[in-house]
Image (tube, rainbow, N blue to C red):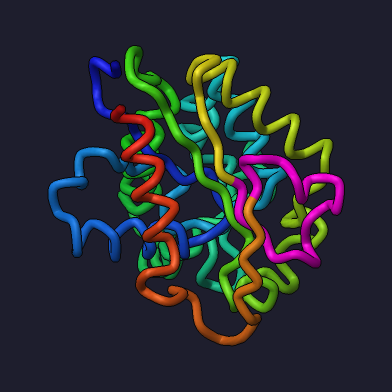
């Protein structure tokens, strides 16, 4: 029996996971303590970015990378990037981006990101982690156009194995996963993996997904991990 509650953490690629977590918690408020916020929240992070973040965390180099103010740059007056974190776009920091050269704004961003990196910098011992990744946000291909290669959001066998290996090294060998993909953006060889799910949410201009899209998944994770 688990001595501590399981923890659920998104590891990319976009905001839809957090929206679905929040929808679920709104209906089941007693489950809020299962969900952990981190650097992956509300940002666009491809599999390349997820791998980079996990590698830096394992090497204890994630905080130095975040704290390097010289590493940041702003694109299109709205999007913030850090050269140490490839394929990581701080997508919802528009206010800071538009005032980036104002004294204190860069420091404000760094402070926020360091706080968000906490669960990765100091993984909690005891209790099982369950990491959830998805590429199904309907508007994601359009959102990343001209930012990142769409191929980096497609789940291949190599990326699947690499992410799992890095995450288990960071969070412990008992770490569990769910990878959720649109069929056309998934290596066919992964279709029968028990921790891979196909959800063919139609592409379009929406970003939250149906409010109950993750209900069955999250209910099962919490039920099994708490048993």
Quadrant housing the C terminus: top left
Location of residue 227 with respect to 150 vertically, above or below: above
Q: Would you say residue 105 sits in the magenta stretch?
A: no
On the image, the x and y values in percent for residue 164 come to 65, 29
Taking depth in this image into account, of 27 and 124 the one nearest to the observer is 27
Report whether 81 appears left or right of 223: right
Would residue 68 be visible to someone looking at this image?
yes
Q: Would you say residue 193 sits in the magenta stretch?
A: yes
| Residue 37 placement: quadrant | top left
On the image, the x and y values in percent for residue 216 come to 41, 57
Residue under the image location 71 percent in, 41 percent down: 193
Residue under the image location 75 percent in, 31 percent down: 161
Residue under the image location 65 percent in, 44 percent down: 49
Quadrant housing the N terminus: top left
Would residue 60 be visible to someone looking at this image?
no
Residue bounds of the magenta highlight: 179-196
Residue under the image location 46 percent in, 75 percent down: 209
On the image, the x and y values in percent for residue 189 come to 86, 46
| Residue 146 placement: quadrant | bottom right
Location of residue 86 with respect to 154 vertically, above or below: above
Report whether 149 appears left or right of 80: right
Location of residue 143 with respect to 93 vertically, above or below: below
């Amino acid at each position: 029996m688990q001595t501590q509650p399981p923890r659920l953490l998104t590891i990319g690629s976009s905001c839809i996971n957090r929206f679905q977590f929040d929808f679920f918690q709104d209906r089941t408020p007693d489950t809020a303590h299962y969900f952990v916020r981190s650097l992956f929240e509300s940002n666009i992070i491809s599999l390349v970015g997820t791998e980079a973040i996990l590698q830096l965390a394992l090497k204890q180099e994630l905080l130095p990378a975040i704290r390097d103010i010289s590493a940041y740059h702003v694109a299109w007056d709205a999007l913030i990037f850090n050269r140490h974190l490839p394929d990581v776009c701080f997508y919802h920091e528009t206010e800071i981006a538009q005032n980036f050269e104002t004294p204190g704004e860069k420091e404000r961003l760094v402070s926020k990101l360091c706080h968000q990196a906490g669960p990765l910098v100091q993984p909690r011992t005891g209790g099982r982690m369950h990491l959830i990744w998805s590429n199904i946000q309907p508007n994601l291909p359009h959102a990343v156009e001209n930012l990142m290669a769409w191929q980096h959001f497609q789940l291949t066998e190599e990326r699947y194995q690499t992410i799992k290996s890095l995450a288990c090294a960071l969070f412990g060998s008992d770490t569990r996963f769910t990878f959720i993909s649109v069929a056309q953006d998934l290596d066919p060889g992964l279709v029968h993996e028990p921790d891979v799910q196909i959800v063919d949410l139609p592409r379009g201009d929406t970003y939250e997904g149906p409010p109950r899209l993750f209900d069955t998944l999250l209910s099962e994770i919490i039920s099994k991990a708490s048993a």
